């Protein structure tokens, strides 16, 4: 799959299980900065998803991770848990 937004393009492989649930998004188009911030190295990154459950009429993943894959191995730099979801919510007018 290819995603384009202006000058940016990301190529990714979407992986689905036998139930049609998205279980991973893998791309080699992301870069990691060196410790001094002067050079960048392309690395694989992925977003594995798991534990689908129903939210009203929708079935969504409730757990996800963000991984970067360096030669030293995979590193999780984020973990997420979906507890609830609202959509088409009217603004409250409060900041």
Image (cartoon, grey):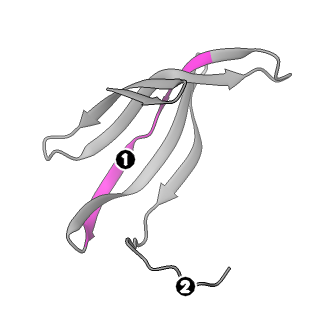
Front position among marks 1 and 2: 2
Q: Is residue 6 left or right of residue 26?
A: right
Circle 1: is it few (<14), some (14-19), or many (20+) Cα within 10 Å?
many
Q: Residue 39 at what x, y percent from top left?
A: 76, 14
Residue 70 badge:
none
Q: Residue 35 at what x, y percent from top left?
A: 82, 24
- Which residue is at a point 22% across and 47% down the rendered structure image? 21
Q: Residue 48 at what x, y percent from top left?
A: 40, 41
| Magenta stretch: helix, strand or loop mostly | strand
Circle 2: is it few (<14), some (14-19), or many (20+) Cα within 10 Å?
few
Q: Is residue 53 magenta?
A: yes
**Callout 2 secondary element:** loop
- Which numbered disc flags the more N-terminal residue, 1 or 2? 1
Image quarter of the N terminus: top left
Q: Is residue 90 left or right of residue 17?
A: right
Establish if 46 lies above or below 22.
Answer: above
Residue at label 1? Answer: 49
From which residue to which does the magenta span run?
Answer: 42-55
Residue at label 2? Answer: 92
């Amino acid at each position: 799959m290819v995603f384009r937004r202006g000058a940016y393009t990301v190529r990714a492989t979407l992986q689905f299980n036998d139930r049609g649930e998205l279980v991973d998004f893998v791309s080699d188009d992301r870069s990691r900065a060196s410790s001094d911030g002067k050079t960048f190295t392309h690395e694989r990154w992925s977003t594995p998803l798991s534990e689908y459950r129903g939210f009203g009429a929708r079935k969504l993943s409730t757990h996800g991770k963000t991984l970067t894959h360096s030669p030293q191995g995979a590193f999780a730099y984020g973990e997420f848990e979906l507890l609830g979801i609202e959509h088409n919510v009217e603004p409250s007018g409060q900041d």
